[in-house]
Amino acid sequence: MTRISLKHAGVRLLVLCTVIAVSCPGWADEKPSADERLQKLLKRFPDADKNKDGKLTREEVQEFRQKRQRPRGASAEPTHANVKYGKHERNVLDFYQAESDTPTPLVIYIHGGGFVGGSKKMNPRLVQNYHNAGMSVAAIHYRFIDGEDILLPEPQRDGARAVQFLRSKAKEWNIDKKRVACYGGSAGAGISMWIGFHDDLADPDSQDPVERESTRIQAIGTIGGQSTYDPIKIKALVGGRAWEHPSIFKAYGVTTAEEALNPTAEQQKRYDESSAITHLTKDDPALYMIYSEADGPLPANARPGQGIHHPNFGRDLVKKMNELGIENVFVYTGDNKSGASPQAMLEFFQKQFAKVKD
């Protein structure tokens, strides 16, 4: 009889168990196959399926990852830069085209700067986020007010012209004309709302094909936007000396408080025409608002212009929009400015675009 020591028996038993585990699937955990891993990725990222055949290939995964991953510090270059959309030297825009086989929704960024400064330069990461969501992006310059020849609402009219120009490029730049949003901060917010609330400025009989395009948009986003540029209403709404902001005086070519608070009939007409809330009607698009300036009454020693981004402007809009039954979102971040999420605004635009019928 052959004797086997316990030591040798243990080794043989270990080898036997290993063989069984390898040969019998039910005895050991199996790693998912390549096809299974691709299927899981498809469930998480359906947009990665470029040809929409319900199957994900390694090549599609690689291409999708390359689109999503941008090296830190890289800059997003416009597909078309400094394109003229009007006669003035500042009537130029940049266009960042999203890759798509079908027309893409368009989000137009309008910079702030008190109507006297600012730039259309975009944050590369923000552009990439919109591209990842299947949206193209445009960023515009507009005329600055000078207190003489260029007054409000000329910058707003430039913004509307930019919308028309971009729509005229729909076929060439693969834009979905039915899904357009505008957003911006401060002056850019005011222009965005003015475009959104104003009656359609399209002129179907114009010799200019751009002017025949609609100025109506489907969604608006604002950061620190002013519902009105009427100094009398700003004084009542915010208090303090917000109404004395230098851009308010310059916007209407006035130099004294007396002139600003006692307008002629013609001047009052300009106040009304320049203020977004004046044009608000029940058929206007939904609005996403972010405010972060200090809330509450302004201090007795407030400086001229302090409070020009006050959340009371937003509350003014909420009240009237609710009365008209228009969807709106009011976000007050207070001292926590990180609460103002660009992603939330992007998702708001997606929601509004989804409501549009083809």
Image (spheres, rainbow, N blue to C red):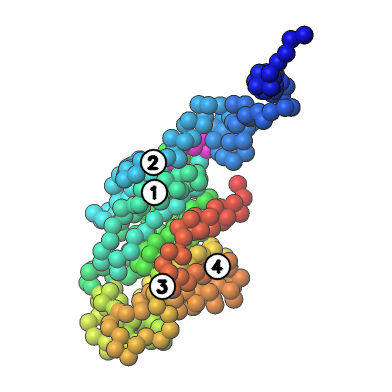
The answer to whether marks 3 and 4 mark residues whose Cβ atoms lie closer than 8 Å is no
Instruction: Evaluate whether residue 274 shows in this view.
Output: yes
Classify the position of the N terminus by image quarter: top right
Which residue is at 50% across, 77% downward? 315
Asked if residue 73 is positioned above or below residue 276 in the image, the reply reads above
Which residue is at 43% across, 84% downward? 296
Residue designated by label 4: 328
Q: How far separated are the C-alphas under marks 1 and 2?
A: 8 Å
| Corner quadrant of residue 156 | bottom left
Residue designated by label 1: 125
Q: Earlier in the sequence, mark 3 or mark 4?
A: 4
Q: Amino acid at mark 2?
A: Arg
Circle 1 residues within 10 Å: few <14, some 14–19, many ≥20: some
Circle 2 residues within 10 Å: few <14, some 14–19, many ≥20: some
Asked if residue 299 is positioned above or below residue 101 in the image, the reply reads below
Residue designated by label 3: 335
Circle 4 residues within 10 Å: few <14, some 14–19, many ≥20: many
Mark 1 falls on what kind of element? helix
| Corner quadrant of residue 76 | top left
Q: Which residues are magenta?
A: 98-102
Mark 4 falls on what kind of element? strand
Q: Earlier in the sequence, mark 3 or mark 2?
A: 2
Instruction: Evaluate whether residue 217 shows in this view.
Output: no
Residue designated by label 2: 70
Which residue is at 42% across, 40% downward? 69
The answer to whether marks 3 and 2 mark residues whose Cβ atoms lie closer than 8 Å is no
Q: How far separated are the C-alphas under marks 1 and 4?
A: 26 Å
Query: Residue 222 placed where, x, y %?
Result: 44, 65
Which residue is at 35% across, 52% downward? 123
